[in-house]
Image: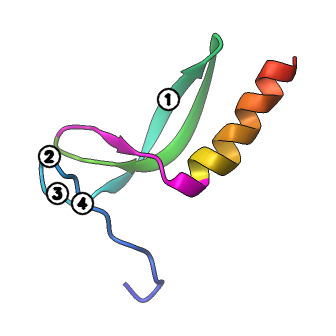
Amino acid sequence: MGEGRKIWRCARCDRELVAKKTIFTYMGLTLAHEVEACPGCGKVFVSREMAEGKMAETEQQLEDK
C-alpha cells in the first residue's frame, strides 16, 4: 500500500472496494470507465473529484452537442 491509495469499504457489505469496469449511460450514450466497486453487492463509488471533474466535463460536452 506504499502508493498512497485510499482504501474504501462498502457500507453495506464491509468489503474493500476493487477497481471494476463500469458502464454509464447518459443522454442515450454509453460510456465505460473503471471505478471502485464492491465485489459483494456491486455498488459503485464515484469520487467527488470524478463527479465534479471528468463526469461533469463529459456531461457538459454532451449537452453542448
Residue contact between numbered discs 4 and 3, judged by CB atoms under 8 Å: yes
- Report the Cα–Cα distance between label 1 and label 3: 21 Å
- Report the Cα–Cα distance between label 2 and label 4: 9 Å
Q: Which mark is residue 8?
A: none
Q: Element under label 3? A: loop
Residue marked by disc 3 = 15
Q: Element under label 2? A: loop
Residue marked by disc 4 = 9
Instruction: Tell me the amino acid under the disc marked 2.
Output: Arg
Q: Image check: 29 left or right of 32?
A: right
Give percent across and percent down for residue 32: 57, 33
- Report the Cα–Cα distance between label 4 and label 3: 5 Å
Instruction: Tell me the amino acid under the disc marked 1.
Output: Ile
- Estimate how packed mark 4 is, as few (under 14), some (14 to 19) or many (20 or more) residues with alpha carbons within 10 Å: some
Residue marked by disc 1 = 23
Q: Could you tell me how many numbered marks the image carries?
A: 4
Mark toward the start of the polypeptide (1 vs 3): 3
Q: Image check: 32 left or right of 17?
A: right
Question: Residue 14 appears in which quarter of the rendering?
Answer: bottom left
Quadrant assignment for the C terminus: top right
Give percent across and percent down for residue 41: 19, 38
- Report the Cα–Cα distance between label 2 and label 3: 8 Å
Residue contact between numbered discs 2 and 4, judged by CB atoms under 8 Å: no
Give percent across and percent down for residue 23: 49, 29
Q: Element under label 4? A: loop
Q: Image check: 37 left or right of 16?
A: right
Q: Residue at x 33, y 70 (%)?
A: 7
Q: What range of the chain is rendered magenta?
A: 41-49
Q: Is residue 47 magenta?
A: yes
Q: Which mark is residue 12?
A: 2
